[in-house]
Amino acid sequence: MSFIIGAIVASFSYVVGVRLPQHENWWSARSQCPCCCANLMWYELLPIISFVWQMGRCRHCRSRIAWRYVLFELAGGVMSYAFYALYGLSLQWGLALFIMLFCFIVSVADMTYMIVPNRVLLYIGVPLLLLYSLQQSIYSMIAGAVVAFGLLYTIHLLTDGIGAGDVKLVAILGAFVQIEQLFFMLSIACMFGFCLFVVRRERIIPFAPALCMATLVTLFVDDLQLFTFY
Ligand SMILES: [Zn+2]
């Protein structure tokens, strides 16, 4: 069940991430096939199931459905299940899901348009931080945000390698992972970023997905208490 919820969250965040930067009406506009523009019915939008049921093709024009949709939904399902195994059915699990939603929306927007939408940071990121601060040390969160921001802002000023959107994003993510885990998170992000660079073979790569995935991994590993010696 937690897997299905995670897959739905991932599917939803994909839609929001693609539509929001284009100022599209993400809550009411019907989903369409990108190839033939046929409106899709609800049973064609079930995460993973529809993809398998339709053998990875559009029901109307038979064009292939991109693999990244289903990979995304799988990733969401697995993460949701992992967090559920950790927290059970609790408030913390819900919070982890929302952080995942936030990270996924930002990743999709950055991968699709190479931007980190301010509105997502402001309307989803900031309220989440406030909620999160209720059960975490506010000082470690602020310290994480400040150090992360300072570090990436310096890199942003010195090189053109990191965009202004990434700097704003990392301040939020830095608060989530807090100062103690910040450098662990940043090293994983660099590793992911390098993998992306190798896979895409482009000079400019979206760095936000690497930061987001690193944050999710860090939050998970941190709560597993594997790295208590940090
Ligand atoms: Zn189609």
Image: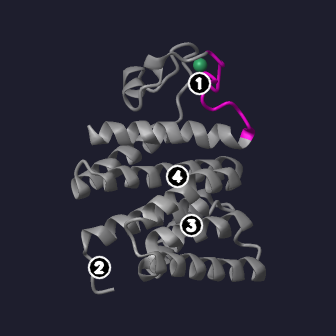
Reading the chain from its start, which is encountered first: label 1 or label 2? Answer: 1
Confirm or deny contact between disc 2 and disc 3 (CB under 8 A): no
Residue 13 location in percent, x, y? 52, 42
Reading the chain from its start, which is encountered first: label 3 or label 1? Answer: 1
Residue 60 location in percent, x, y? 56, 13
Q: Amino acid at mark 3?
A: Ile
Q: Which mark is residue 102?
A: 4
Q: Residues within 10 Å of mark 2 (few under 14, many from 20)?
A: few
Judge whether 194 appears above or below 66 on screen. Answer: below
Q: Amino acid at mark 2?
A: Phe
Q: CA distance from mark 1 to mark 2?
A: 43 Å
Residue 219 location in percent, x, y? 38, 66
In the picture of the structure, the residue carrying the numbered disc 3 is: 172
Q: CA distance from mark 3 to mark 4?
A: 11 Å
In the picture of the structure, the residue carrying the numbered disc 2 is: 227
**Looking at the rendering, in which quadrant would you find the C terminus?**
bottom left
What segment carries the magenta color? 22-38
The answer to which of 115 and 20 lies nearer the viewer is 20
Q: Which mark is residue 31?
A: 1
Disc 2, SS: loop
